[in-house]
Image (cartoon, helix red, strand yellow):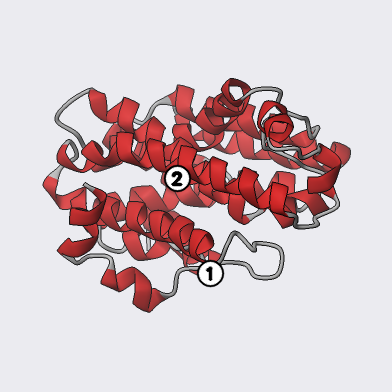
Amino acid sequence: MDRIADAYHVCSERVKHAGSSFYYGMRLLPTDKRLAIYAVYAWSRICDDAVDDYSGSEAQQHLSAAEMLYQAAYAEQWRQAAHPVSIALGDAIRRYHLSRDAFAALVAGMQMDLAPRLYQTFADLEQYCLKVAGAIGTLCVEVFGFTDDRARELAAKLGVALQLTNIIRDIKEDAQRGRCYLPLEDLDRHGVTANDILQAHSSPELIRLLTFEAQRAKRYYQEAVGLVDLVDADSVRCLKLLYGIYYLLLQKMEDMGFDVWSTRVQVSRREALKLMGGTFWQAIG
């Protein structure tokens, strides 16, 4: 097995064992695109792990190492890179002309997580979402291929929608890490304090706040739905499934009254497969 094929194999194994819902969608792509997305996702997981599994200077060291992985992928001698993720990324970058700025943006977003902060306004939070999720959306549509430059804008909007969904779902875990992502202006409007969230206790006020944030996420989903008409035909099924999984995740949280403290909401494989039917897309559109 040559170094590039071996590197892609390492990435695919990392994705497979990550347990992400994204895996179902990725498998629907043609081989070359699927491998490129595996490489991007494997690298993004390394970034995530740096800020979620470590703290302080150790987290910074791991994130800096992740940054060096993508920089090595852009180097002239990328085939000789020490880490397989760099080699796989190097090949994907050259096949699909992946944006270096998108990689840098994600690292910048992860830097924001190293020193947990409070976001005063939604505009502040949106900038964070665009860095950590919009950047991944950009890289994905560059692999998917698209017919209209609006695809980049819509991919960024979808990234914000997905990140808002994650923030609602992971509010308990984030609180345990000392993180509160929801904007202070929204907390004030609903009679909630940052300490209420950090203590991870549900309340009627907090449920109303999460309902408000879910409606905001849905608006982003609606704005992004046209993306399926702009990407290459061989990527549409993947995009629809990724979109559908996260939209369903949001709906499930809504149906259970946003009780995200006692249960971690997930979309099962069976539920994911059902999303490919036309009924879901008729309801969304």
Is residue 54 visible in this depiction of the protein?
A: no
Q: Residue at image x 66%, y 35%?
A: 110
Q: Residue at image x 47%, y 67%?
A: 16
Q: Is residue 60 left or right of residue 77?
A: right
Is residue 158 visible in this depiction of the protein?
A: yes
Label 2 to label 1: alpha-carbon separation: 15 Å
Residue 280 sits above or below residue 88 on the image: below
- Which comes sooner in the sequence, label 2 or label 1? 1
> Residue 8: percent from the left, percent from the top?
41, 56
Q: Which residue is mark 1?
A: 17
Graded by Cα atoms within 10 Å as few (under 14), some (14 to 19) or many (20 or more), the crowding at tag 2 reads many
Q: Is residue 174 left or right of residue 241?
A: right
Q: Residue at image x 19%, y 39%?
A: 231
Label 1: which secondary element: helix
In the foreground, 233 or 168: 168
Quarter of the image for the N terminus: give it.
bottom left
> Residue 266: percent from the left, percent from the top?
52, 68
Q: Tell me which amino acid carries mark 1.
A: His
> Residue 66: percent from the left, percent from the top?
63, 40
Q: Quadrant of residue 209?
A: top right
Q: Tell me which amino acid carries mark 2.
A: Val
In the foreground, 214 or 167: 214
Q: Is residue 2 left or right of residue 163?
A: left
Q: Which residue is mark 2?
A: 40
In the foreground, 239 or 75: 239
Q: Residue at image x 39%, y 54%?
A: 247
Q: Is residue 153 left or right of residue 146?
A: right
Residue 140 sits above or below residue 7 on the image: above
